[in-house]
Amino acid sequence: MALAPRIPSHTHWCALQLYLQWAHDELMELEEFLRIWDVSREELAFICDCSLTTVNHWFSQGEHRRFPSEKHQQKLALAHHIWVTIESEPEYLQKLRQMYHTKQRRRQEK
């Protein structure tokens, strides 16, 4: 039995607006992210939604060196925020999320 789609309330829209504003304003430097998280260049490319070539340019020296854009820094800040939040999340919420994802996978398989 499928549930009818829900109409987002004013509270939903306000929460989304606050979150998007935070995500837009929050930046994280690559060096700071790498001091906290041990990720590969391939993983950085995934997080920042860019090519491995772009990430490699961030680490190069000389005239070919590039720096992460504001959009890349936003994605680093978002990944950091999510990962820190997950670590401090109560166990019961983790179990609820796991149950929800299991239920969603079963629906997709049908």
Image: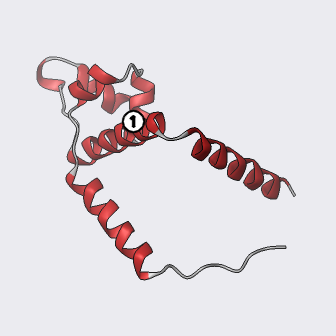
43 or 80: nearer the viewer? 80
Reply above or below: 36 against 46: above
Residue that badge 1 annotates: 84
Reply above or below: 17 against 79: below
State the residue at coordinates (29%, 54%): 23
Reply above or below: 80 against 14: above
Q: Quadrant of residue 77?
A: top left
Residue 69 coordinates in the image, percent (x, y): 21, 43
Would residue 73 appear left or right of 79 to someone viewing this image? left
State the residue at coordinates (20%, 33%): 29
100 or 46: nearer the viewer? 100
Residue 78 coordinates in the image, percent (x, y): 35, 45
Would residue 19 appear left or right of 6 to someone viewing this image? left
Residue 8 coordinates in the image, percent (x, y): 50, 79
Disc 1 residue type (three-letter): Val
For the view shown, which residue lies furthest in the left direction? Answer: 63
Q: Quadrant of the N terminus?
A: bottom right
Q: Quadrant of residue 39?
A: top left
For the view shown, which residue lies furthest in the right direction? Answer: 110
State the residue at coordinates (36%, 23%): 37
Residue 38 coordinates in the image, percent (x, y): 39, 19
Would residue 9 appear left or right of 60 to someone viewing this image? right
Q: Residues within 10 Å of mark 1 (few under 14, many from 20)?
A: few
Visible residue check, residue 50: no
Secondary structure of the residue carrying numbered label 1: helix
